[in-house]
Image (cartoon, rainbow, N blue to C red):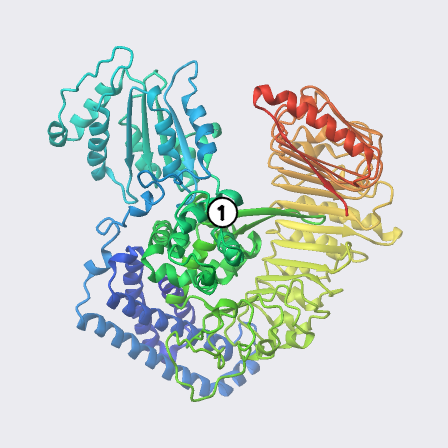
Amino acid sequence: MEGAAQLVSMVGQLVGEEYRILRSVGGQVAELRDELATMNAVLRMQSDADAGSVDHFVREWTNQVRELAYDAEDCVHLYIFRVRCRPNDRFFVWSRRLLTTLFSRRRLADELRDLRARAVVISERHARYGLSREALSRSSSLAPAPRATKHALRAANDPNQFVGISEQAKLLAAKVEKMDDNKERNVFSVVGFGGLGKTTLAMEVCRQLEAMFDRQAQVSVSQTFGRKDLQGLLKRVLHQIVKVKPDKEKGIKEEDSLTPGDIDKMDLDGLTSTIEEKLMDKRYLIMIDDVWTIPAWEVIQSKFPRNNNGSRIIVTTQIETVAKTCSPGSDCIHQIEPLDEKDSEKLFLSRAFGFKDASCPKELKAEMGKILKKCAGLPMAIVSIASLLASYQSPDSKDIWERIFRSIGSEMENNPTLEGMRQIVTLSYNHLPHHLKLCMMYLSIFPEDYVVFKDRLLHRWIAEGLVEEKRGLTLLEVAEGYYKDLMSRNMIDPAPFVSNFRDGGVETCRVHDMILEVMVSKSLEANFVSLVGGQYGGMSYDKIRRLSIHGVEQGAKDLSPPPKKMAARRHGRRDVMEGMNLKHVRSFSMFELEGHKLLDRLDEFTLLRVLDLEGCSGLRNKHLRDICRMYLLKFLSIRGTDIRKIPPSVGDLEHLQMLDARDTYLRYLPKTVTNLEKLERLLFSTKDTWLSMWQPPSGISRMKALREVNNIVIRDNIQVAKEIGDLEGLQGIVVHVNGDSEIREKLRKHLAASLCRTNALRWLNVGDTRVYGDNNLDYLMDLRSPPQLLRYLRFDGGISRLPDWVGSLSYLVEFCMSYGRLKGDQPFAVLCKAPNLRIIRLHEHFYSGDKLVARTAHNFPALKEMRVSCHNEFPSVFSFQEGSMTKLETLELNFYDNQKSIEGVEHLKKLKEVQLIGWKNNSAINRALELLKEDSDRRSKDNNQYVVGVKYYD
């Protein structure tokens, strides 16, 4: 439902833009805009209200408003697409278009009148049935979410409540117990998504340390905690700390004179002063469970005295920013881990079969494996589903287990046993601000277990209009903030970085299956997303707004147009898909690689803004003709397809912001791409070719919105080298020079001058196609004004030494190099001066000397990770002197089949992981492994061991 408010706001903007042109129907447009603006305010109130406090009538009324908003936006966009005159039309073209679109304008006027009438009817219905503002404004503070779910894992006398967290509890208890010399009060935070067992872990730590502290208390904070709730919380604390433990040495138990009745009568000031009096000279341990906001933490912690008795506070929270505020030191933050495979199975079996050390019948093992994979180590999910299956223990229950696995989403909605799991996810979702709810629901477009590239997600959010404008920030920067916020709240999980030769490390994410189930449920309810195929094979929809194909099962592949007289049903679910109406689709994502029939209907997607066909092998060159007529398109990805040619008409997509044509069979792009003046991101590469580039034509400077362009080569066009400097907003570029010897020097000169003018550049990969040439990149040595905002820098080609300006880049985070053939103290002598450099990646032929030495003088202030991947024999020795790379945590070295060695690894005091790569029969790897293991074992007495890994080539 959150999508409705955003839609209405967008419609108002669009109507406002077209108001001047639509003079003939201006009055109707204005009335419609005013009506929708009023509804927008009500919809935002509904979005902010707790889901459980809004009745069914409000939900149905909201659905009607949402559909009206969708239709109104479609109406205006159809006008833009079919009727309006283009800004650059000449008088004759403009006049002819006015005459030829008279019928369309008349139809538009009729549609606007109908929309206006619908808006009035919906408003009257709102008044007729007596809907009050109070019904919308009731929030979770008035209807608190049940908190029984927080205790589901710690039932009394439950022997399995600590499965998988006992070891974590011991480690955390040791940290909490440890007394610093200054004995100051310390705060420890346990952070992680709901259902991971944070509360259980914290309570077990408190139990283990009970004898170490004079006073203890454990309290929980509500999601809507404010100053008015502080008095009740302090009363609960005081009730617990007046229960004095007996003095074991004296055998005496001193009774506190303060009675429960006295505490209940106290006001806030009295509670504060009494708690301070009781705790000031004591060592106390307070657990504050489920803190949601920084203001809540600040007001609570201020009520506990900062004595010097080694007191401790343990906080549990789902939000990393809250944890960092509570516990400024990283050593005091414990990121709770999901259960591993062994503990997940142990917990599942004990709940499903009712006793410890239970075993699973072999007939049910496959289904159990699928269920545990979906739970992904989340204890609450495991317990909930296992409890549901506890009545079906016989081997004959395989069909029931399989059916419950397939229908976990609907079971979470309807089955009381799984209600706790849904409540946990819903509680976290309801705490999101309005704009993040939309972005979170949007993730339901992607299939289960799908790894999503961060950049792909952010640009899709922008193209869909889900990212709000903020003064002083680009939309991409705002979207970055959204992404970090969702990551901080543990609503999305980081997936492993994807690293490749061209782009370095690329950030990815995924959504836990249980969270995804709830997001899918909410998206389907709000008609925010329509899912087809796989487990959604039996579903169909009346009006499809965002269509995602997840994989069409046999018997559900009929994607032909629907019969004209097919009855429209709101969220109509039919057993067999009879067809689709595609004219309202604004976003189309294809995760089924064979979608031929639907692709043949691309001409029906009139209102499409987002078209994501990544990896779709069914896409053919002929389909591009239809795609290039999608006038409203903002996001287009044909990445990983077999496309060999893009027609020149791509230049007509004047609203296009993102074009991803990586990993195709394209050899070039049409010259008309320079007409795409709103294009912000242009990505290109060719399959099976590491040096795949395209040559931009003159006129690239017209693409003023361009922020990122990759894999371009400048051969003989000096004008292009000059025009790159005119792209004032350019933030990332991969550019190589490849010209004849006569013109190459001029190209280098002008490219260097252009790079000095790209002041916004954050990401630079510069090279020469003749990678084996001598010092082809020396023209970069004396850049008069190098881009100072660079975060990522890569050199591909020979260079006599690293330019000194590289060490002056204050924002540089990652440096990569290949084919540099450096010698001596290069590259470390320059790179060590970069104050924020965190990652170094060194590839083929980066060095031509025998021994690469990180000297004592090379004390990198921020370096955490270094990966050296080169197949040639140089360098043959990696040496680390004492005091070098003092903060290095990850070291990866590729031996390939060469005889290489490591020296001085004992000087890398902060190491956490060393990874070696090479052939299994390489004796040098075995010698290095022995050296590393010995060094790691020596560190065990200081609890400072690191992980040693090896990866062999097949």
Q: Is residue 85 above or below residue 818?
A: below
User: Would residue 592 be seen by someone viewing this image from the given angle?
Assistant: yes
Secondary-structure class at tag 1: helix
Which residue is outermost to the top? 250
Choose between 482 and 201: the one closer to the eye. Answer: 201
- Asked whether, in this view, residue 95 is left or right of residue 900, the answer is left
Choose between 363 and 732: the one closer to the eye. Answer: 363
Q: Which residue is mark 1?
A: 345
Q: Find residue 385 and report its image quarter.
A: bottom left
Residue visible at 35% across and 61% down in the picture? 413
Residue visible at 83% across and 46% down in the picture? 771
Choose between 400 and 622: the one closer to the eye. Answer: 400
Which residue is outermost to the right? 741
- Asked whether, in this view, residue 659 is left or right of residue 516, the answer is right
Dot 1 crowding, Cα within 10 Å, few <14, some 14–19, many 20+: many
Total residue callouts:
1
Q: Is residue 838 above or below residue 729?
A: above
User: Would residue 19 be seen by someone viewing this image from the given angle?
Assistant: no
Q: Find residue 647 and report its image quarter.
A: bottom right
Q: How far across and down, in percent of the image, does residue 338 sit?
A: 48, 43
- Asked whether, in this view, residue 253 is left or right of residue 885, the answer is left
Q: How far across and down, in percent of the image, does residue 24 sit?
A: 37, 81
Q: Is residue 952 above or below residue 265?
A: below
Where's the N terminus, which quadrant?
bottom left
Amino acid type of the residue tagged 1 in the rendering: Glu
Q: Is residue 703 above or below residue 509?
A: below
Choose between 104 and 433: the one closer to the eye. Answer: 433
Q: How far across and down, in percent of the image, does residue 186 sit?
A: 39, 24
Q: How far across and down, in percent of the image, does residue 468 sit?
A: 43, 55
